Amino acid sequence: MSLAQCRVVLVRTLYPGNIGATARVMRNLGFEDLVLVTPEANLLDRKARQMSTHGEDILHRARIMASLQSAVADCVTVIGTSARTGGLFRRQTLGTPEAIAPHLVETLAHDLPAALVFGPEPSGLTNDEVRCCHYLINIPTDAAYPSLNLAQAAAICLYAVRRAWTDHQAKPMAAPQSNTFAVAPFAAQEHMFDQLQHALEGIHFLYGPKADALMHALRHLLGRARMSQMEVDILEGLARQLRWYVKHGRRAEGKAEE
Amino acid sequence: MSLAQCRVVLVRTLYPGNIGATARVMRNLGFEDLVLVTPEANLLDRKARQMSTHGEDILHRARIMASLQSAVADCVTVIGTSARTGGLFRRQTLGTPEAIAPHLVETLAHDLPAALVFGPEPSGLTNDEVRCCHYLINIPTDAAYPSLNLAQAAAICLYAVRRAWTDHQAKPMAAPQSNTFAVAPFAAQEHMFDQLQHALEGIHFLYGPKADALMHALRHLLGRARMSQMEVDILEGLARQLRWYVKHGRRAEGKAEE
């Protein structure tokens, strides 16, 4: 396993200096894979290159993607960062960098891709983007001035991942946990969640103003379990059966009863 | 005790942006006392103020001193930072930020002043300055590109001090981890699984020879996530809605359609 397999995703970053400084600290701490989602800043701006120092080749190899979903499509673990902790965020597994980093490292230890996602200055990730994340990191800060500079937040988070990684490597062959199986990729999970959501709307379980919060809670619960492809297939099957039932079920039973 | 009593000392800093960004992250993490030893950069340079954001009043209150010795004269614990680990540095108590930070916090806990010292970009503290330090922090980095940006190194170190400080404050209460919520008791989970099983039989998702294996897979998946009581309640709600739908749903819709 290698930290090079940990993708760093910067979403709609405004300032080229922040992209450059993030590339630099990635290089310092052993990360390589930088992806920018619809950046506002030009990643080859003079300021970005100036701040990147030895990280300049990370800038040159950075990929630009149209959405967070596509940026993390193959990732098994997606970890967002947020300065907010209330509302939607309360339902998500939210913790300090050092509490959450081991989850990411566990994925890397299975040679699977994982992503660490940073929102734009100063607004952060949208609720829809937060929903894509299996875990959220919140860096505990002074309540009066919580808003960290993006590249400094990246430094703190990447350092926590590196520490969890070296800790993991120091464990002699860390006896594999019982749940070492291939976790289904993000895109497969998303497809299933879409199907499930439609099916649950069909039976009016998701209904009215609480629908979003309920679906979010289900996504969070299932996401935490790190589903295998087989389990994703089972839930797709459930969604299919629900839709079938809504369409034909009672009618078929009605006939049988008649 | 307060983090405000932890002095941050920047020695011969070259770039005003680094002074500003350090002031910002100090403000973010609850530090206040900035001292500059013979800075090359002007601490009220436009760039310093621009990078400081809410930390601007820290810049305005910063003191300028002629030597490291005078900057830390009243301090009980002085902690330096260094990218080097050989030579002189081998003789010093040298460790990661999280290994060294508790020493600093112990001093703060006795209401005594302590200092965290950062050398100039890119050369770092001189041997004489290193000798002034009781402990040295080395941030473990990639061997090929060890040189961190000053303000990012400050972010990582100050975050470690803040963590040690909050850990220290939490100790008498034997603090639970931040993200450990109460897992629902076994009996509540069992009750929910019973309800869910009946409901899934109702819609013929659990059906035929594979029903047992399917239900087992679902139990395993959900069990692994270590459900909270709220999540168990959500799934009970889903089971209830399924049973309601089987009984009334299509009929109600049928009526509406008629």
Image (cartoon, coloured by chain):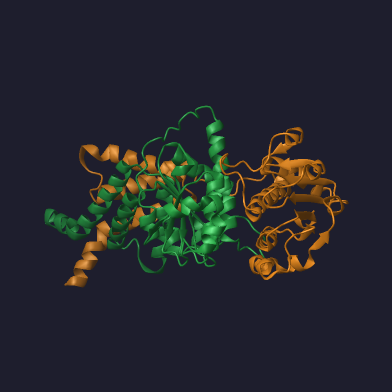
Chain colours: A green, B orange
Quarter of the image where one finds residue A5: top left
**Who is closer to the viewer here, A42 or A110?**
A42
Q: Position of residue B191 (x, y in %)?
A: 41, 45
- Residue A23 visible in rendering: yes
At 54% from the left and 50% from the top, the residue drawn is A54
Quarter of the image where one finds residue A144: bottom right
Quarter of the image where one finds residue A122: bottom right
Q: Position of residue B53 (x, y in %)?
A: 65, 68
Q: How many marks do you count on the picture? A: 0
Relative to B79, residue A166 above or below: above
Q: Position of residue B132 (x, y in %)?
A: 82, 44
Relative to A210, residue B199 above or below: above
At 33% from the left and 52% from the top, the residue drawn is A187
Residue B69 as seen in the image, left or right of residue A86: right
Q: Quadrant of the C terminus of chain B?
A: bottom left
**Who is closer to the viewer here, A161 or B128?**
B128
- Residue A99 visible in rendering: no
Residue A77 as seen in the image, left or right of residue A85: left
At 19% from the left and 56% from the top, the residue drawn is A249
Residue B213 as seen in the image, left or right of residue B32: left
Relative to B46, residue B81 above or below: above
**Who is closer to the viewer here, A97 or A88?**
A97
Q: Position of residue B80 (x, y in %)?
A: 75, 45
